[in-house]
Amino acid sequence: MERRQFIKNAAMASATVAATRLALGKDPPKPDSLPPTPGVTWDKAPCRFCGTGCHVQVGVKNGKVVAIAGDRKAEVNKGLLCVKGYHVGLALYGKDRLTRPLLRKGDRFEPIGWDQALEIVARRIFDDPEGFAIYGSGQWTIPEGYAALKLVKAGLGTNNIDPNARLCMASAVTGFLATYGVDEPAGCYDDLDECDVLIMWGNNPAEMHPVLFSRVIDRRSRGEKVTLIDIGTRRTRTSEHCQHHLLFKPHTDIAVANGILHLLLERGTYDRAFVEKHCRFRADSDPATLQGKEIGFDEFKRRLAEYTPERVQQISGVSAQDIRMLADLFGRRDLRITSLWCMGPNQHTRGTAINTLIHAVHLLSGHFGRPGDAPTSLTGQPSACGTVREVGTLAHALPGGLVVSQAEDRKKAEKLWNLPEGRVSGKPGPHTVELWRRFSTPKDEGGTINTVWVQVTNPARSLPNVNELFEPSRRIDGKFLIVSDVYPSATAQAADLILPSAMWVEKNGMVGNSERRTQQWFRMVKPPGEARDDAWQLIAVARKLYELGHPGMKDKDGRFLFAMEQGGVEVPVWDYRHYYDINVDSRLFEEYRTFTRFKHKDLAPYDEYVKARGLRWPVVEQPDGTWRETKFRFAGFDDPYVKKGQEFDFYHSTTKDGRAQIWFRPYQPPPEVPDAEYPFWLCTGRVLEHWHTGTMTMRIPQLRRAMPQAYVELNPADAKKLRVTSGDLVVLESRRGQLELPAWIEGRGAPPPGTVFVPFFDESLPINRVTLDAHDPFSKQPDYKKCAVRVRRSARRIARP
Amino acid sequence: MAISGLVITLDDDPERRRAALAALRADERLTLGEPTGNHLPLIAETRRAREGVELIEDLFTQPGVRFVDVVSVDMSDELEDGDPASADSVGDPSHEEG
Ligand code: SF4
């Protein structure tokens, strides 16, 4: 058979299997094998892009990725992919891959050797360890994040490390911690297959987590009844699928949640038995702390008294009738309700508050812990959970949920790392906004961070208010920016030293998705030129520091921090020629794994992940030697850590009595609101075709052409007043900066009057010159979803390409 | 040439389904398979993979089409043709686009 016909047959076979599976909700009678494409070898990997964590099969031929197929064995996506996942292989092959270390010389970059590059980095650190910070990412693999954390916390004895995930899910973390005493969702994606009602709080999964969303749409197609409710600030592609679209005024989701709580109490439809047995009530303390203070049920009820449906309607714009509709649903015991949220509640100056309130609505109504009854936050990045939240690459954290502020936790870490007592610092490092502020402030004015090493992220475009947080650093003497990346991103172009990195299947990797699922893959192709693994770069710098005599690079027996042996002989993994002599990922992971049992986040041995399409923690060894994952935490029927005979057990309860905390959080106005001078709300976000700042997807010609440029969505009535039509250039201006970009009216999303939306994928149109760096007091996560802007028609007239 | 395997979720409404099926049949880039319930497997053949994405975007807006899932893509011809660039190209930070 002709090769082409082979490929067509394979594609049709895959699509037919997927269609049958979607239609019937199960495998067809004979699950088939991989597409029989001639000359192509296949292996599994998670998709490089979003936090859904779909698995793909990667087809490799002649050392290149040539084909991608959805992985039918993967529970997450059951063989399906979205348009980004479908093109993930091409992310490797942009024309301008970085292939050599480059050192800035004035306005130009000069290629240098790796040895010189490592020497420069190590010298900067050696000379000023306190002034050095690593800024990482939820796209770091688990071993990469672990190596970075160990270098900083175990080696340098500082906590100067924070990730871009601070910008996307830190409020989800503080929400979980304040409610359950331990991070990450109790439920999982299986809830989407079981729920009767799915509520999306400021979330657009049809574009941001499309494969997850299609799981729900498919249930409907099979005739199942699922009610979809979108609670948001603009109409999106998700809204089109929902029976109810509740439009709220920006920031007032807190009032909406309080309205539901109020009615549950007033009508007595809350789950009294669940609450009395498993919950306590809390409110903000003075001074405010993450744990707040305990209040009784009566006090909780009294505080909520003012949130009548009519009052909530006044604050939020959501009708009293819709508030009652939501309370009716939560008041029913016969329904299963899942809530999903992502950036809406997280990128919020009251992010911790709204996160805890969504949990509160579920806990008070008892919609918790049965399959389909779950408050579940989603993440945007493929390993925001695995690397940032679990490994703990945050300024205050240690691996496995330990924190630097607890002496006991530091001791545990020092013991596992075999460090002298006192090596791990108890002083948290600067969080992201603070880190960059210090880097963008002269040393003599308190700018204590002088060297930043960025890996796998693009802060020049993704930080808020970049005019203040990023750009000044490029003009201040003595500030040195090191960037490890695969493409010359805006951050790389602003760097002093660029280190070329390997990406995705050019290296071994492990990540953790939104549902606590840890995933693994092997290197399949070689990186271009001299591009090298990020974990190797970290280990090689640590070795240089060791050679320079930095005392922190040795454990208490004098061994190199990253020493790895094979058959009793040390393998020089810092020398790239030997990096793949052993599986460094597996070594780092096995070491990290020892931390995960402290907070019941147990991970299985590396080899278990090689066999699986990911496993959800805690993964616990069974008497027969097999490893069992956990789908529903804190629920007696599934979680092995729940005390025998108990239906629920919040075993990390902050009140140490197995109970979760139901929070009261008052509505408070946002820090910046539209006024006569800046009359519009600005919301920023993503689009289906592009991922984050577009450094990968804008280099995939197919995706770039489908969505070539950022734009501003305007409401037609506003556009009319401004005399703007689609394609006209408009100037968008806040108190911090301005940007000129084309208008799109009645485009994909529909903002209500007085609101505009701009996506942030386009490096050439950086909307974060305009956004606000105000952040949540607990999570320190900034609010990219709302600030005040004005809009005017530009004098220039350049049509949108 | 790029060959993609897709699954389209069709609308419940018979009128809209019929309209969607007629429109899909008329598109010569598509070969339709046998539907199971509302789910229609099909393959799309486009001259370049980039047209595949545009096609999917169009399919999303087609009345009677509820959702488009992607199952596989083969672009080996395209990569062998040398587009996009080979993995050996040398990075140049002044180069703004790929
Ligand atoms: S939904 Fe996310 S993980 Fe899945 S294919 Fe799309 S981008 Fe990749």
Image (tube, rainbow, N blue to C red):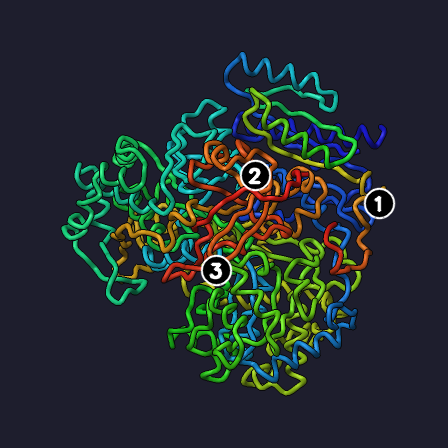
Q: Assign the C terminus of chain A to one quadrant of the image.
A: top right
Q: Residue furthest front?
A: A795
A439 sits to left or right of B70: left
Nearer to the camera, A131 or B24:
A131
Ligand 1 in which quarter: top right
- The answer to whether A475 is drawn above or below residue A221 in the figure is below
Find residue B82 and name its label.
1
Disc 2 sits on a residue from what chain?
A: A
Spatial distance from mark 2 to mark 3, Cα to Cα? 30 Å
Spatial distance from mark 3 to mark 1, Cα to Cα? 39 Å
Q: Please tell me whether mark 2 or mark 3 is closer to you in this view.
A: 2
Label 2 in the same subunit as label 3 = yes
Disc 3 sits on a residue from what chain?
A: A
Lower sequence index among marks 2 and 3: 3
Q: Which residue is mark 2?
A: A743
Residue A641 seen anywhere in this rendered image of the structure: no
- Quarter where residue A313 is shown: top left
User: Is disc 1 placed on a helix, strand or loop?
Assistant: loop
- Residue at 49% from the left image edge and 55% from the top image edge: A385
Residue B95 seen anywhere in this rendered image of the structure: yes
Q: Amino acid at mark 2?
A: Ala
- Residue at 18% from the left image edge and 57% from the top image edge: A295
Q: Amino acid at mark 3?
A: Arg
Q: Residue A556's spot in the image, x, y percent? A: 54, 85
Q: Amino acid at mark 1?
A: Gly
- Count the labels in the image: 3
Q: Assign the N terminus of chain A to one quadrant of the image.
A: top right
Q: Please tell me whether mark 1 or mark 2 is closer to you in this view.
A: 2
- The answer to whether A587 is drawn above or below residue A747 in the figure is below
Q: Residue A481's spot in the image, x, y percent? A: 63, 70
Q: Which residue is mark 3?
A: A166
Q: Residue A432's spot in the image, x, y percent? A: 49, 65
